[in-house]
Image: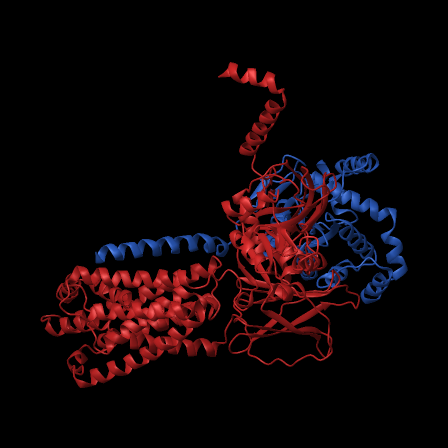
């Protein structure tokens, strides 16, 4: 084998061998070296340069990089506008080779408040995406970044260090880095054209003491914040942000701490749960009056009391829900049956049951406080955009409505019934406590509508609000036990089951049915009519299966689980993924990438525009927001004669890779236009301009005389 | 099955409660005054604040590499300061026998520095017979920070140091003549003198000395505070400052100065 090879080498000269060795060299070095720099690390911050691509692909004119920062526990870093004090990170690329420009992108910041000083920045992990352009396309890139940044905890420590990263020629995606860059590139506020938030007014108030910002959004605002930027000499205080009733209109008043008339390119950034926008603004002179109630998360005491009262009522109603009623009635009958118990024992037993109920709701509240504390925040109404959540809610409520109308009975497992029945006789407060706990646990599926409301309200409120609301809910649920504990003799005076119970059931059933109908309506909006029909059919099957009395128990269980499973997963799959904002997506000009279809479209006289993009590709995002998704190019791409295909290369895809290879490209962005005038395609430069795209579309669409 | 579920729930509850307690309780407990003797400079000791202590490179500040001339100046300042640390720290202060001297180091860009300046000023107003403060500027964050430091020291020469910091609490510093004259009139100081002082060699030298002190005490950042012979790095509660002052009064701080 070896001899054979040597012979060949001597025949063909040394080139193939050199090529082979070189290739192996690239291959090995790629395998060994990840596309990231050494890290600078101390207790305040760990910093690295990362690259989405392992190497510079042939002809690639740009590359997606990121400055990955990980702040230590308690440390913070700053945004491009740091706030009243602080300092934004700075990168100096002097000493880099083959780097034409590097644009730093800033993910949406958080607001920090300490000692009455407002600061904007990041904590924990953040990647500042960097859009780098190359001097010589396709040539290796050597990066040397001098980074200076300030971190503060109880002490402010500046850092000044150098990171270097060499990207040789090569292809391949570093999935981990690419994923990180994509995640944070997604958090970079969108330009106005790509956002469903519209900033309508920016004005100084009558006394020039505050900036007023008014904005509208198609989808409701969640946890919203406003960051005006008027240059380094203007600083602002804490904003007063208000939303209207359906949370689609925002009014914010931001006190001015320091002002100057000289500010180039002022802008306002609005951050919200999962989205953000930065828009250039011009000051107008007419400040609109504050129209709405405050959106301050610290809800007024009155509101908390109102919600607590609702929660209390809700808890009380839960007792007659099909899942809790059995527990309560078994508990009560066990007392009636039990003889030889002293009044005191009965009283204590019920007190412990009530305590069990409260313990469970407190555990829920604690879990919620924990979620809130680790940063989970659910804006009002946000969950109603999630098809899986809506499906689940719809099914639970529809099934309970059917139950209340008498379609079937929900009965507790026999073992549990026995245990509950026995618990009264066995004088152990622990088992009484268990009864209460069980009642509360069993109540959770029925209480979804109430809990959902309470949770969304509570997540937006303070810890105190959470505790108050959940305690009210628990007290409501525990009220029957507490009443009996106060007056054990009332057990005998409880109304006997009868016609009145039927009325109550029908009334509750009607309420639930109305809720289910509303949820179905929401589902149509969120997941489309097909998914909604699919879910309702499965729910109907579920109810029918549950109501057939003589069915085999195992078959019934299998059918029920299958229905629930299919509905929930089906809803997730059949609905449109919510990766892009609805509203923007609905009017998208893009169709799926179909390389085989290109020739057919061209033969039909159409022009095909292909955009190969990826979530981690920063230049692609820039092209998209600055050229492709903006008029006049957008209008052209939407026009009837143009088919706009988008190929998403976020995850490796053989089809797309082969398509790129055919045009000698190994990196993206890649845009190409096919048409009667250019059947073999006009490849566009990596960095698009509206003119270049329009020209290419024009050239491609006209059947030239030469090609006839 | 029921008891199993219950115990699982209980375990989860305990874990959550435990973690939450671990996070919140320490901040509720009274802070403990824990002091650690410093190897250098001898006689001084530092308040151990926990996480903000070691792990950082000796502090240099932001900026480009030093030229030989600047390096020589720095070396000279270090020499000058090391010869008599106390006089560099407490400068012109002449504390009465009952007073404890304090040296406060702050930077324009550091949020807590402004708060510290205000607090120390308030405290001095409360107990003028017990403490006296020497104000240092440690501009570590580039040109603006450097200019603001010079302006602060120039204001200090007209007894307006604290007023200057309060004025800058909410508004950015601008290095323009118009801004400086407006600032001077707001503070009620002589504008021409302010500008002249800012450019004076005395202030340049004062900044050099403060920077050298930062190196002597191995400060990692700002704010920094020396109370008598106790070094404090970072934010600290008023109560602790009072405790340290009391301790310094009790134990005496003058030894360290005569020794050095």
- Asked if residue A266 is positioned above or below residue B77 in the image, the reply reads below
Quadrant in which residue A110 is drawn = bottom right
In the rendered view, tell whether residue A75 sits above or below residue A206.
Answer: above
Let me know if residue A665 appears in the view: yes
Establish if A96 lies above or below B249. above
Q: In screen coordinates, is A645 left or right of A571?
A: right
Q: Which quadrant holds residue A137?
A: top right
Question: Which image quarter is the C terminus of chain A in?
Answer: bottom right
Q: Is residue A47 visible?
A: no
For the point 42% across and 52% down, which residue is it? B19
Q: Which of A624 and B46 is in front in this view?
A: A624
Q: Is residue A708 left or right of residue B12?
A: right
Q: Along the line of sight, which residue is nearer the eye, A225 or B227?
A: A225
Q: Which residue lies furthest to the front in this view?
A: A708
Quarter of the image for residue A425 reads bottom left
Q: Position of residue A64 (x, y in %)?
A: 62, 47
**A330 or B183, which lies in front?**
A330
Location of residue A408 in the rendering, given as x and y in whole percent from the top left corner: 20, 73
Q: Which chain is red?
A: A
Picture colour scheme: by chain
Give the percent coordinates (x, y) of residue A614.
Answer: 56, 51
- The image shows a total of numbered marks equal to 0
Q: Colour of chain B?
A: blue
Relative placement, left or right, of A694 versus A39 is right
Q: Where is residue B87 in the image (x, y as percent from the top left)?
A: 77, 43
Q: Is residue A8 left or right of residue B167?
A: left
């Amino acid at each position: 084998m070896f001899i054979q090879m040597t012979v060949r080498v001597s025949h063909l000269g040394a080139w193939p061998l050199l090529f082979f060795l070189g290739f192996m060299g690239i291959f090995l070095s790629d395998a060994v070296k990840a596309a990231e720099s050494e890290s600078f690390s101390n207790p305040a911050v760990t910093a690295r340069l990362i690259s989405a691509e392992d190497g510079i692909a042939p002809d690639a004119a740009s590359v997606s990089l990121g400055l990955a920062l990980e702040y230590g526990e308690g440390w913070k870093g700053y945004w491009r506008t740091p706030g009243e004090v602080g300092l934004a990170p700075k990168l100096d690329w002097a000493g880099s080779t083959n780097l034409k420009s590097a644009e730093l992108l800033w993910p949406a910041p958080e607001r920090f408040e300490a000692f009455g000083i407002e600061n904007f920045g990041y904590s924990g992990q953040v990647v500042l995406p960097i859009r780098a352009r190359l001097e010589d396309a396709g040539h290796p890139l050597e990066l040397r970044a001098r980074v200076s940044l300030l971190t503060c905890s109880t002490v402010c420590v500046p850092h000044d260090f150098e990171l270097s990263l060499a990207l040789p020629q090569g292809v391949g995606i570093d999935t981990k880095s690419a994923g990180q860059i994509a995640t944070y590139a997604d958090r970079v506020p969108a330009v106005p054209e790509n956002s469903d938030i519209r900033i309508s007014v920016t004005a100084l108030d009558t006394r020039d003491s505050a900036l007023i910002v008014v904005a509208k959004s198609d989808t409701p605002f969640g946890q919203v914040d406003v960051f005006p930027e008027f240059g380094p000499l203007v600083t602002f205080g804490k904003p007063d942000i208000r939303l209207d009733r359906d949370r689609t209109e925002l009014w914010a008043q931001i006190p001015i701490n320091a002002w100057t008339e000289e500010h180039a390119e002022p802008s306002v950034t609005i951050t919200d749960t999962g989205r953000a926008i930065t828009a250039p603004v011009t000051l107008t002179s007419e400040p609109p009056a504050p129209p709405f109630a405050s959106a301050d998360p610290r809800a007024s005491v009155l509101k908390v009391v109102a919600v607590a009262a609702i929660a209390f009522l809700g808890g009380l109603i839960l007792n007659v829900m099909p899942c809790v009623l059995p527990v309560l009635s078994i508990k009560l009958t066990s007392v009636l049956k039990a003889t030889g118990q002293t009044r005191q024992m009965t009283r204590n037993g019920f007190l412990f049951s009530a305590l069990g109920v409260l313990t469970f709701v407190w555990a829920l509240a604690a879990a919620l406080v924990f979620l809130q504390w680790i940063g989970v925040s659910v804006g009002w109404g946000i969950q109603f955009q999630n098809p899986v959540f809506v499906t689940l809610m719809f099914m639970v409520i529809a099934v309970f409505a059917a139950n209340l109308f008498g379609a079937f009975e929900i009965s507790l497992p026999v073992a549990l019934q026995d245990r509950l029945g026995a618990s009264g006789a066995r004088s152990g407060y622990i088992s009484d406590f268990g009864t209460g706990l069980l009642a509360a646990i069993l109540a959770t599926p029925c209480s979804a509508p109430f809990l959902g409301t309470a949770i969304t309200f509570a997540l937006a409120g303070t810890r105190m609000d959470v505790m108050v609301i959940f305690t009210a809910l628990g007290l409501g649920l525990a009220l029957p036990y507490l009443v009996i504990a106060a007056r054990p003799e009332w057990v005998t005076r409880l109304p006997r089951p009868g016609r009145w119970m039927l009325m109550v059931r029908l009334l509750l059933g009607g309420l639930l049915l109305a809720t289910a109908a509303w949820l179905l309506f929401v589902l149509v909006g969120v997941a489309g009519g097909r998914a909604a029909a699919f879910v309702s059919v499965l729910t109907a099957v579920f109810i029918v299966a549950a109501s057939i009395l003589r069915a085999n128990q195992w078959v019934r269980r299998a059918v029920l689980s299958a229905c629930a499973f299919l509905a929930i997963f089906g809803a997730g799959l059949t609905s449109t993924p919510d990766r892009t904002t609805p509203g923007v997506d609905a009017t998208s000009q893009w169709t799926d990438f179909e390389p085989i279809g290109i020739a057919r479209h061209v033969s039909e006289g159409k022009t095909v525009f292909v955009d190969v993009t990826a979530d981690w590709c920063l230049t692609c995002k820039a092209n998209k927001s600055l050229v492709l998704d903006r008029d006049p190019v957008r209008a052209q791409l939407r026009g009837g004669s143009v088919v706009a295909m988008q190929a998403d290369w976020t995850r490796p895809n053989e089809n797309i890779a082969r398509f790129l290879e055919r045009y000698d490209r190994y990196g993206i962005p890649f845009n190409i236009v096919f048409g009667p005038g250019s059947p073999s395609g006009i490849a566009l430069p990596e960095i698009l301009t509206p003119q270049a795209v329009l020209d290419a579309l024009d050239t491609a669409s006209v059947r030239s005389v030469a090609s006839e | 099955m029921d008891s199993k579920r219950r115990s699982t729930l209980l375990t989860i509850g305990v874990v959550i409660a435990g973690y939450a307690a671990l996070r919140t309780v320490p901040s509720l407990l009274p802070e403990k005054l824990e002091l650690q003797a410093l190897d250098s400079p001898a006689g001084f000791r530092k308040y151990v604040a926990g996480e903000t202590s070691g792990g950082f490179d000796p502090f240099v500040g932001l900026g480009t590499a030093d030229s030989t001339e600047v390096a020589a100046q720095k070396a000279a300042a270090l020499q000058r300061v090391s010869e008599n640390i106390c006089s560099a720290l407490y400068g012109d202060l002449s504390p009465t026998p009952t007073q404890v001297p304090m040296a406060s180091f702050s930077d324009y860009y550091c949020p807590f520095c402004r708060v510290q300046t205000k607090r120390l000023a308030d405290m001095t107003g409360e107990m003028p017979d017990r403490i006296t403060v020497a104000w240092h500027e440690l501009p570590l964050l580039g040109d603006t920070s450097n200019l603001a430091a010079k302006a602060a020291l120039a204001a200090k020469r007209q007894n307006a140091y604290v007023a200057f910091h309060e004025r800058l609490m909410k508004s950015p510093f601008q290095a323009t003549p118009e801004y400086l004259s407006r600032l001077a009139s707001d503070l009620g100081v002589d504008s021409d003198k302010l500008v002249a002082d800012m450019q004076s060699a005395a202030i340049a030298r004062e900044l050099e000395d403060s920077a050298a002190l930062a190196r002597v005490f191995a400060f990692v950042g700002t704010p920094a505070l020396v109370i008598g012979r106790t070094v404090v790095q970072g934010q600290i509660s008023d109560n602790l400052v009072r405790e340290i002052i009391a301790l310094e009064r009790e134990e005496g701080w003058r030894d360290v100065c005569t020794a050095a």
